[in-house]
Amino acid sequence: MSHAVAEIIPPPAAPDAGPTSFHPVERQVYRDGMARLAAAVNIITSTGEDGWCGFTASAVSSVTDSPPTLLVCVNRTVQAHKAISTSGVLCVNTVAGPQEGLAMTFAGAGGNKDMKQRFAGGSWTELVTGAPVLAGSIVSFDCRVTNVSTIGTHDVFFCEVLAVCGGEGATGGEALVYFDRKFHAVS
């Protein structure tokens, strides 16, 4: 009877995992990779001492359902940043396919920074916080900011959801996603 003897091979030595061992990818490599990550298109709105303000964003994600919380990443140079920081409220309006033009307007297409002109292109209501809610959106989440974290050029706003408007009037049942640096309507 022959007995096999297992050879014990120690694992390879771990490389120095100190904080200086790793380096982030180059900015353009990261941006090119992110262009391949499809994301919902949202118009983030708020209200402040200068009135309503908003911008188009895809950096929105669910955090938890207990308490119901979203995170919204906002570049600190965006006009709406001050209003969100000061008022502590925002609304995430997930854009329907036929609202692509409005999403472009809120993205600043043509250099439009005039908030009254931006809001003139849609129909708006309010829920709990006073932040504008887009009629016909796929869904709108009316939120209060509960925490903020600063990372690089952006602030990450953690937002407790106080009300949800289900988008009963959304046209065509299409959502708008951003992929490969373009908008795409999906059913």
Image (cartoon, helix red, strand yellow):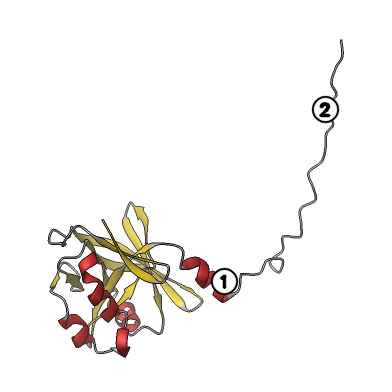
Residue 97 in percent (x, y) is at 24, 65
* Disc 1 element: helix
Task: Characterize the local packing of mark 1: few (<14), some (14-19) or many (20 or more) Cα atoms within 10 angstroms.
Answer: few
Residue 27 in percent (x, y) is at 56, 75
Report the mark closest to the observer, 1 or 2. 1
Q: Amino acid at mark 2?
A: Ala
Image quadrant holding the N terminus, namely top right
Residue marked by disc 2: 6
125 or 159: nearer the viewer: 125
Q: Quadrant of residue 87?
A: bottom left
Q: Earlier in the sequence, mark 1 or mark 2?
A: 2
Q: Quadrant of residue 187?
A: bottom left
**Residue 54 appears in the rendering:** no
Q: Amino acid at mark 1?
A: Val
The residue lying at 48 percent from left, 79 percent from top is: 153
**Is residue 178 depicted above or below 62 in this figure?**
below
Whole-number angstrom distance, CA of label 1 to CA of label 2: 45 Å
Residue marked by disc 1: 29
Residue 121 in percent (x, y) is at 17, 80
Task: Characterize the local packing of mark 2: few (<14), some (14-19) or many (20 or more) Cα atoms within 10 angstroms.
Answer: few
Q: Quadrant of residue 113?
A: bottom left
**Is residue 187 depicted above or below 51 in this figure?**
above
**Is residue 179 depicted above or below 51 in this figure?**
above
